[in-house]
Image: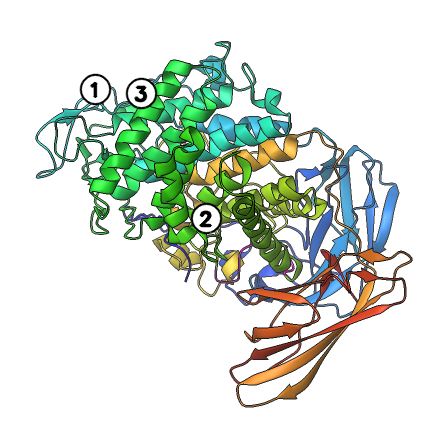
Amino acid sequence: MPPATASLPRRPARLSATLLTGALLVGGFVPAEAAAGASAATAAATTAVRVNQVGYLPDGPKRATVVTTAAQALGWQVRDASGAVVASGSTVPRGADAPSGQSVHVADFSSHRTAGTGYVLTVDGTSSAPFDIRVDLYDALRSDTMAFFHHQRSGIAIDASLVGSAYARPAGHLGVAPNKGDVSVPCQAGVCDYTQDVRGGWYDAGDHGKYVVNGGISTWLLVNSFERAERAGEEAALGDSTLRVPERGNGIPDVLDEARWELDFLMRMQVPDGKPHAGMAFHKIHDAAWTGMPTRPEQDSQPRELHRPSTAATLNLAAAAAQCARVFRPYDSAYADRCLSAARRAWSAAQTSPAMYAPDSDSTGGGAYGDTRVTDEFYWAAAELYAATGESAYRDAVTSSSWHTSADAFSPYGFGWADTAALGRLVLATVPNGLPAADTARIRTSVTAAADAYLSRMATQGYAVPVPADGYFWGSNGAVANDAIVMAVAGELTGDARYRAGALETMDYLLGRNALGVSYVTGHGESSSQNQHHRFWAHQLDASLPHPPAGSLAGGPNSALQDPVAQETLRGCAPAACYVDHIDSYSTNEVAVNWNAPLAWLAAYAAERTSAGGEPPTASCTVTYAVSNVWATGFTANITVKNTGPTAVDGWQLAWTYPAGQRVTSSWNAAVTQSGTAVSARHTDWNRTIAPGATVSFGVQGTHTGSTPSPTAFTLDAGACA
């Protein structure tokens, strides 16, 4: 099942959806909505040639998806701004793509590395949106995605000198009329008998609520992006005076300044000493009823309420504050000490109250963010406290956790606010610690195995998306970006360029190479989201208010259709096409800090100047898959891979997807793993090399539930085989 997601109920939405329009596609192409078998309301693409509308890095992968029913390969051409052909080739037919419901081909023009602007990819007479190829491609996106958090700040005036006049506004929720808070906020009835100063922090999403479990992971991701940049020697790009924050020029990296705004709020949410549940963290604070739309923060007249503490919130505080103690120490040791003290108190309180869960019923005025499994939060917090202190008590908490050896720490659906074990693994894999070398090696292998599974899934999908076909739930775009982080860390750990290529291809998906041909990031791409669900970026409801600022990520396709606009306009949509750019489609088009945080991490990573590759190898191979035996519930199959290229393959990984849900139970002559329907087979020591013209063979045994159709697409080391 997909992980728990923030399915936040909202006030009734308007049904007057503004529908994006599709253009008539010719030359062998079919409209996306017809290929998907969905209603015309799902149409968003203006062309069947889907590219990253921002562009591509010179040394990175450059692939496009073409919606077409053509059975044979089609010719493609890349033309520069003058119309001259600078590259050409043939598409690879991929056939039916289950998540999008479309029939597609893939065009790979990675070999063209010449920088330029205004490139267009043309396939069989139909052209893509224009795009660039340049090394500074993601610099603006890095800045804009980080600026999102400053825009979302509570308790501070947003100055026009930093954001422009359209986005400037007075401070919200500081107790200035008509606001009722947040400097002295009472609890809900029966929760506490005192008030708490919980000013500051970030508004969580499109409303005025502030949630510790979402704030914790989002803060961690921003700080982690700086940690990763430090390890790569690229921290200057996120250093002092690099971002649009009021603290610029204070000698502290700007990304840490932004994170500190939320960290201060998280620590204000801690129950004071001498009070019941001291050291725990209140789960959330928001209006007593859902805030009306549109409403700017300083105009909100509703009473504010603190909601009961929770173990999950407390452990989020412990993890984020312990990370703060490590990363902030070179810049502000006193603040680092304050963070560590808060982390220790939170850890102790969570141990005392290990099962204080936020009720799912607490969803009036704000999302419930319920989570009744917190062993993963314990693991994450213990990992961060151990990394910060090296103390044996925290090490023992790490090694005794079931998550320390669990195969499920990296799920097929990625990590998220309710699934945080992967964060503990990422900490232990990248931060020096005292664990035995064998333990560290196993943890790092778990990261690369998860990344391999994502790459395998991408290789078998027409749009190269790391989430499975049933992974298009509330906030699916955030899950895509989270998966990219795992691939990027795997690349850091191994030096294998395949992982960087995979991470970069997820950016292609978010920026236009998707089932709808739309960039989900406001202000980036020829056709980008403009009407994301938000209380004060609400131009669609009030022309005096702005559209969302550049760099805001829409939640993305959600096949559950959990709002009236989606239900009205997206009936019959394929999972990857269940999105509409309308302000009232909160289940597909809201923004949230925990979606923008991984995008900001990914944008900073992609913006780094590197000569370490990023272009996946081009496979020259053929694969024969032969089912040798079938019985009532099982089968055996033999797979032969031939190297048709001019050079030897030294070390190989073959990937495919089973079309009928077959499950591999054993294998020979290869190490085979499976995640969902995605299968990955690695060489053994004795058959790792495939000479030109040579073959290797291996076999699998598995189970089935009635049929055993053969896979139709294979990739060798991320390159497609014939």
Q: Nearer the viewer, mark 3 or mark 2?
A: 2
Q: Quadrant of residue 402?
A: bottom left
Q: Quadrant of residue 106?
A: bottom right
Q: Nearer the viewer, mark 1 or mark 2?
A: 2
Residue 405 picture location, percent across and down: 46, 54
Residue 57 sits above or below residue 17 on the image: above
What residue would you read off at disc 2? Answer: 415
The reply, left or right, for residue 311 in relation to residue 628 is left
What residue would you read off at disc 3? Answer: 155
CA distance separating discs 1 and 2: 36 Å
Residue 507 picture location, percent across and down: 61, 43
Circle 2 sits in a helix, a strand or a loop, which is it?
loop
Which residue is at 87% across, 43% downward? 86
Q: Is residue 467 shown in magenta? A: yes
Which residue is at 52% across, 47% downward? 439
In primary-sequence order, the first of circles 1 and 3 is: 3
Residue 114 picture location, percent across and down: 83, 36
Q: Residues within 10 Å of mark 2 (few under 14, many from 20)?
A: many
Please identify the dominant SS of the magenta region: loop
Q: Quadrant of residue 491?
A: top right
Q: Residues within 10 Å of mark 3 (few under 14, many from 20)?
A: many
Q: Looking at numbered disc 2 in the image, what kind of residue is underneath it?
A: Phe
Q: Looking at numbered disc 1 in the image, what kind of residue is underneath it?
A: Gly
In primary-sequence order, the first of circles 3 and 2 is: 3
What residue would you read off at disc 1? Answer: 175
